[in-house]
Every structure is written in structure tokens, then in C-alpha cells.
Image: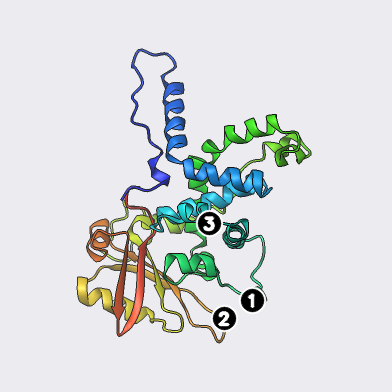
Amino acid sequence: MSTLITSSTTTTKPKPHHHHHHHHKEVSRTINLFTFHTLERNLYNHLVHRMNRNPERVKSVISLWLWLESIGHVGLVRHINSLPTNHSISAFVSEADSILDTILDHHPHHPSTGDALPELSRLVREPLDLRFFRFHRDVAARGVARAYKNVCAVIFNEVVKRAAARDRNHPMNRIVSPAAAASAPPTFPTATAATTVGSTLNPNANPWVPAEQRSVFVAFARGRPLTEEEVVEFFTLRFGECVESLSIEQTAAGMVPMFGQVRFVSLSMIDIVMNGQQAAKFVVNGKHMWARMLVPLSV
């Protein structure tokens, strides 16, 4: 499945004898991105100009939404863009703010505020709350950073500069220092070596395929968790020795796990288990388990 984030490659080949071929390639890539991401640019303009949101923060918010689209929650930006009121758009933005704070760990978890993401979870129709982003923090941070670098840093750049030049009261002109105006993207936590290399405890494991490409997010119905044993047994009975490793969230007292991650031994195995799809739903011992690939299929 092609995804928004990976669609940034260009099909225009520069002429071999051209001295500035690299520049041309960059320009055509930018034009492709611009036309491909019209919805994102509309939404960005609306959030920055009509709703007076901070331009840098809006880039991060849209990067998050693009990452969610890339893992299969397609249509998210289109939905938010089509909302009739600023109030309803704000609800999605404030959930995105909470998610970014969780990923970037700006605010330690306060149980009082709760983990629910009502707007987003209603839209994706599978279990999703802040615990998902806390548990999968590394993967989410890398995904959002990738969307930021490959898409958002490119498509919103000129728009902002032009708007700021036209309008003295533009939010960007309220930033005091020139350094802050050109502020760098947020720094997302970097991966630890273990998450990218992957352990090779299982003799069938292929260490050359990055662990993330062989992994799925799993989610359980609220209040109906599965144990690690149940998950491994389910996959093993159906597909043989296919699970390399597995982790399920550790929860506070009185809470039951809802999220986990399963790493399979090879790319071909994850393809069999998921039947070539980005997402699948299984019934394990009478309980629902959602599985979704960590990395977009086309990466």
C-alpha cells in the first residue's frame, strides 16, 4: 500500500548532462510534494492563519497525523480538514498535543488527566489512547520525525515565509529572535541500538531485516487482555515457530494491559501472518486482538 509519507519520491529524471541536476531533482520533488499534500497545506493554513496556532507546533501536529496515516489510519487528515467548526478541529489538535507531549516526554504522566483520546479512537475504530503512544514511544517518535523531515519541513516552508512577509501581525513575526523564527524541528528521542538491530535469540531470525519491519503493534479490547503465553501460542499453533520476541505493556495496579508489540522471525513470516495486509484482527480464545504493522508496507 502506498502511503502519504513515502510518496515523496520523484518520477522526473534530471537530464544527465545538466550541471544542476541535483537542484532540479530537489525542485521537482518539492513540486510533487506540494501537489500531493494540498489537504495538509489547507489544514496548515487554516490552523496558523485562522486559528492562530504556532506554526512550528502545527508542523509537528500534522507530522503526527501523517505518521498515523502511514501506519494505515488513512483519511485522518481529510476528515479533520472537512470538520465544520474550529471547535471540532481544536479537539483533534489538543489530542495531538497530548500525544506529542507523551512522545517527547515533556510532561510526565498525570493519571488525573486520563489517557483517553475520544476523537481519534472513535475515528480509527480500534483501541487507541495515550498508553499506546507511551508504550510505542520510540517507534512513534521516529515515525513522526520522518514525516516532519520528508514532508512537513518541505511543504510548509515557503507558505509560512510568504505569509509572514505579507502580514506584519503574522504569528511568525511575533517570535522575538530570528533564531527562534527559523526554529529547528523538535528533537524526537532517538532509537536505542536494541530496537533497530533486534535480538537473534530465535535461530530462524533474519538479523538483516530491521526489527521494525518484522514487527506489529497489537491491541486488546478494553478490559479483555491476553497474556504473552496466549499470544505466542496463538501464532505458533497457526504458523509454527514464528515469534522472535514479544512485549506487553506493564500497567499500574488496577489496570489491565491493552497494548503490546510482536516481532516475527522474518519478513516472509510477517507477510504470511498478516496476509499481506497492513492491519488484521484476530480472535484469540474468544477475545479480540488487533494487529497493525509498525512500518508502512512500502517502506
Single out the mark in the foreground, 3 or 2: 3
Q: Earlier in the sequence, mark 2 or mark 1?
A: 1
Q: Dot 1: what SS?
A: helix
Q: Amino acid at mark 2?
A: Ala
**Quarter of image, res 90:** bottom right
Question: x, y percentage for residue 169?
Answer: 75, 38
Q: Which residue is mark 2?
A: 252
The 10 Å Cα crowd at callout 1, few under 14, some 14 to 19, many 20 or more, is: few
Nearer to the camera, 281 or 216: 281
Q: Position of residue 101 (x, y in %)?
A: 62, 60
Residue that appears at 38% across and 36% down = 9
Mark 2 against mark 1, which lies toward the viewer?
Answer: 1
Residue matched to label 3? 83
In the rendered structure, the answer to whether residue 138 lies left or right of residue 276 reads right
Q: Is residue 240 shown to the viewer in this render?
A: no
Query: Which label sits on residue 111?
Result: 1
Residue 269, image x and y in percent?
24, 62
Label 3: which secondary element: loop
Instruction: Check whether the beta carbons of the residues at disc 2 and disc 1 lie within 8 A of each other.
Output: yes
Mark 3 residue crowding within 10 angstroms, few (<14) / some (14–19) / many (20+): few
Callout in the foreground (1, 3): 3
Which amino acid does the dot numbered 1 rest on? Answer: Pro
- Residue type of the residue flagged with mark 3: Leu
Q: Nearer the viewer, residue 144 or 95?
A: 95
